[in-house]
């Protein structure tokens, strides 16, 4: 009887150990899995990452404060170039806010880079749409040019190491189930 009991205890420990290691492996996310998730969301990742060019721009309603992109290193940065007069930009802003509220505590930062508009215009827009993510002013369009922005909205995803992994031209529902799944995987890496 003792022999059977000891054998069952050893078998139980072995099964517990194996199930623990299997669940750890199941939680690992590969680059292929991440690429597949973003492809399924209709936003394929870049084939090669590109180092994000650093910049410093004035914050909207920041009382003269500035924000430097490199200060966000360690977070996933959703870098969106836009303007208040742009209908597709206005269309996607509520879904960006939903995404921000869902994932900001998990390491997602949204940075809305407004192109060539005044602080008053942008601050009024942010209040009207109840947007809580930060916006900065690219008053002369130099940063947009540096990033090759030719149409708005244009969105880049910058990984935690400061590399651009995605470029999306045009508006999108950023709070769709497929995007949320892809962002979940990215933030879990």
Image: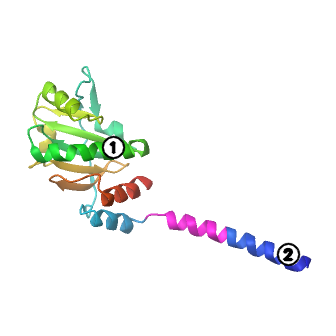
Please tell me the numbered disc located at residue 129: none
Residue at x 74%, y 69% (from the top left corner): 13
- The image shows residue 86, relative to residue 186, as above or below, that is above
Color theme of the render: rainbow
Look at the image and say whether residue 28 sits in the magenta stretch: yes
- The image shows residue 114, relative to residue 174, as above or below, that is above
Residue at x 10%, y 34% (from the top left corner): 116
Which region of the structure is painted magenta?
A: 17-29
Kindly tell me whether residue 75 is visible in this rendering.
Answer: no
Along the horizontal axis of the image, is 143 left or right of 101?
A: left
Looking at the picture, how far across and down is residue 80, in whole percent?
21, 44
- The image shows residue 86, relative to residue 50, as above or below, that is above
The C terminus lies in quadrant? bottom left
- Evaluate if marks 2 and 1 touch, with contact meaning CB atoms under 8 Å apart: no
- Near mark 1 (Cα within 10 A), the count class, few <14, some 14-19 or many ≥20, is many
| Image quadrant where residue 53 sits | top left
State the residue position of label 1: 100
Residue at x 26%, y 27% (from the top left corner): 66
Please tell me the numbered disc located at residue 5: 2
Q: Residue furthest right?
A: 1
């Amino acid at each position: 009887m003792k022999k059977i009991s000891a054998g069952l205890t050893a078998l139980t420990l072995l099964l517990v150990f194996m199930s623990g290691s299997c669940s750890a492996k199941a939680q690992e996310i590969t680059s292929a899995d991440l690429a597949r998730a973003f492809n399924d969301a209709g936003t394929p990742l870049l084939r090669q990452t590109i180092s994000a060019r650093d910049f410093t721009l004035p914050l909207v309603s920041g009382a003269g404060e500035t924000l430097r992109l490199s200060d966000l290193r360690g977070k996933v940065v959703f870098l969106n170039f836009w303007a208040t007069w742009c209908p597709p930009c206005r269309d996607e802003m509520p879904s960006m806010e939903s995404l921000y509220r869902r994932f900001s505590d998990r390491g997602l930062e949204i940075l809305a880079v407004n192109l060539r508009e005044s602080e008053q215009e942008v601050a009024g827009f942010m209040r009207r749409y109840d947007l809580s993510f930060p916006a900065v002013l690219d008053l002369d369009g130099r940063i947009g040019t540096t990033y090759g922005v030719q149409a708005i909205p244009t969105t880049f995803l910058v990984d935690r190491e400061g590399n651009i992994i995605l470029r999306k031209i045009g508006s999108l529902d950023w709070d769709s189930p497929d995007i949320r799944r892809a962002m979940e995987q990215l933030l879990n890496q």
